[in-house]
Amino acid sequence: MKKQNHFTLDEKLSDISRRDFMKFCGIMAVSMGLPIGVAPQIAAAITNPKRRPPVIWLHGQECTGCTESLLWTSHPSIANLILELISLDYHETLEVGAGHQAEAAFNNAVTENAGKFILVIEGSVPVKDGGIYCKIGGRPFTDIVKETAAKAAAIVAIGSCASWGGVQSSEPNPTGATGIPEFLKGTTVVTIPGCPPNAYNFLSTILHFLTFGKLPDLDEKGRPKFAYGRLIHENCERRPHFDAGRFAEEFGDEGHRKGYCLFKLGCKGPMTYANCPSILFNEVGSGAWPVGTGHPCFGCVEEGIGFTIPQFTQADVENVTPAAAHAPIRAERGAGVSKGSAALLGGIAGAAIGAGAVIAKRLGDADKGE
Amino acid sequence: MEIKRRDFLKGLASGALLAVAPPALAGSPKKSRLPDALGILYDSTLCVGCQVCMVACKKANNMPDEHYGPQKIWDNPIDLSAKTLNIIKEYENGNGKYKDRKIDGYAFVKRQCMHCVDPSCVSACPASALTKDRKTGIVTYNKDACIGCRYCEIVCPFNIPKFQWEEPFPQIVKCQLCSHLLVKGEIAACCSECPTGASLFGPVKDLLKETGRRQKMTPGKQYDFPISSISSGKTQTHKAARYIPHVYGENEAGGTQVLYLAGMPFNRLGLPELPDRPYTALAENIQHMLYKGMILPIVALGGLIFLVKRTGEKEE
C-alpha cells in the first residue's frame, strides 16, 4: 500500500488509510446491491465499538478452506479489519491459546456474550453413531453446536459443508455429515455455501447485520438473495457462445482456447445459483473465477450438484431464460392484409365479376341475334 | 318424367362404377417403412436451445446467413426459408420460467424436412425432381429436373420446401439429411454437433426403439442418453423429463423418418395435427383408380365417340 502522508493518525484505522477503508465500505455496499451512499453508514457501524458484536467461530467437519478464503483475500489487510470489525472472540484457527486454555476462552466467550454473539459455523456435523466422528475437548460436535446455537443472536453457516453437508455428505456419507440448517431444524440459519465461498458474500452479510440490525433477504435455503439469487449461466461472460452454439469440445482444443462455452465439458452454470461471475475471486481483475479461467463450474454451492453430479456430466438446462433471439413457433412475415390491399383486391374481384356478367349477357344477345 | 329403358341401363352402369370406387378410395395401401431408413429423433426435452445445429447446418450446406429485423450482424432466421434448412423455434407461455411446461413454461422445437414415409412432395412433383431414396428413404432434390412449379411447396403438410424467390435461376430448398456427408460415412451435421443428444441420428427402426425406452423412463431419474448417433457409443446422463405419451412422426401423415418426443402437446410446438394416412393418398388413389388397366379412359372414350356420332346423325 502506498504511504499517504497527508492523513493524520486520527483518520487512520490501525494501518489502513481512511481512503482505503471507505473504498472497502463502498465495495461492500455495492456487493450487497445497496446504493453507494450507504457506505458512510457502513463505516459508522464498523467503527462504533458499542455496535461491534462478538463472533464465535466453530469448526466442525471441514478443511478450513472457508477461513483461508476469508484471510487471504486482498482487501486492505482483511485479517486486521475482521478483528476490528467483529470482535472475534473465539476462532480455533486463529486462537493463540491451546488445549484447556482455548476451552476456557470459548466457555468465557459464550457465557459473557450469551444472547448477543454471532455464531459462525464452518463445517458439517457428523450425526452418525452418537456424533463420535468429530469431537472437540472430548465432547461431540453435535452437543457443542446445540448448546452454543441456543445462546446465539444469529447463526451463520459458512461454506458448503456447514450449509448442506459438503463433500463428506456425498454417498455413502459414512459419518452422517449434516448441514447446520438440517441439524438445527426450526432455527434461522444464514447459509453462505461455496467451496470455498466468496469472502465478500460472508462479509457483506455480517455488515448488513451490523448496519441495519437485521439479516439480509434470504431465500428458502437461507442464502442471502443478493449473492445467491441469480443463475451463473445467466451472468456468465461465456453465455453468448452458448447462445450461438459455440462449445469447447475438450480441454485445450481451439474452442477452449478461444473462450467458448464450457457446457459440453460439464459446466454446472445452468443449474447453479451464485454471484461468482459478477463478484469474481481474489480481486485480481476480470476472468478470476472458475469458468473465467477455463474450468467448467462444479456447482460447489448447490446441494445435490456439487460433489454429487460428476464433473463431466452435462448439466440439466431447466430454468434458464432462453436467448431473446429465438424464432417464435408461428412466424408472421410481412404486415398481413392491409385495408388498401384488401380494397384493391376487392375492386379487382368486383370488376372481374361485372365484366363476366356483361360478357355473358352479350353472348346471349349475340345468340338471339343469330 | 319419362325414363327410357336405355337411360335406365346407363344409370345402372354408372351406379355400379361408383359402387366400386369407394373401397378403392378408402383402402389406401399405407406404405411401410423402409427397413434401412435413416432419420433423426429430436427430443424437445433434451434441447437446450443453443442453436448449434443451425450453425452446423449452415456450415455443412454452405447456406448464407439470414437476417430478420434491423439487426444485420448475426444469423437470426425466424422460419425455414430458402436460406435456412433447419431452425430451432421457441415456445413461450406466461412468465416462461419452466422448461417443457405448457403454462408459464418454455420449450424448443427443431423444424426441418420430416422425410415422410410416403412424401407428398414426391407424389406431387410432375418432373420427378424430388425423389425418395429406395434404401435410406431420404427425400432428395434434383435441380436439373425441377421445372419450378412449386407444387411441392403447396402440398407439403409440414410447410417445408422453400423456393428461392430472390434468385434468377431459383431452386427448391429443403433439408436432404446431409446426404452429401452420409456418402463420406459421416452423419447429419445437426446431430453430430448437438451437445445433449436432442438431435439423434440413426436408423429409424432403432430410433423408434429408443422412443419406446424413453417413454418408459421414470421422470426425474437419471438415465444415459446417446448423443450424435444412436450407434456412436457416446452418452450423456440427464434427468428424464415427463414425456407426453405420443411419438410425433410415428404415424403422422403415414409416418415420417424424423421423429419427435416432447414434454407438451406437439400442436403447441407448431407441429400440425395430421391424420395417419399420407396426404396425397386420396388424390393418388383417385388417379390410380381412374387409369387402372385403362378401362375407364376407354369407356369414357367410347362414350364420347358415341355422343359425337349421335349428334352428327341428328344434325344430318
Image: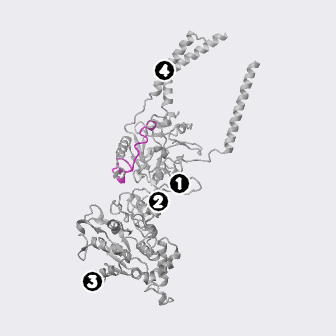
Q: Which residues are magenta?
A: B225-254
Pointer 4 residue:
B19
Q: Nearer the viewer, residue A61 or A283?
A: A61
Residue at the spot 40% in from the left edge and 56% down from the top edge: A316
The picture places residue B287, in percent across and down from the top left corner, at 51, 27
Name the image colouring: one colour
Q: Secondary structure at mark 3?
A: helix
Residues beneath discs 4 and 1 located on the same chain: yes
Residues beneath discs 3 and 4 located on the same chain: no
The picture places residue A284, in percent across and down from the top left corner, at 44, 74
Distance (Cα) linking label 3 and label 4: 108 Å
Q: Earlier in the sequence, mark 3 or mark 2?
A: 3
- Closest to the camera, between mark 3 and mark 1, is 3
Q: Nearer the viewer, residue A146 or A328?
A: A146
Pointer 1 residue:
B75
Q: Is residue B297 left or right of residue A355?
A: left
The picture places residue A34, in percent across and down from the top left corner, at 50, 72
Pointer 2 residue:
A241
Distance (Cα) linking label 2 and label 4: 64 Å
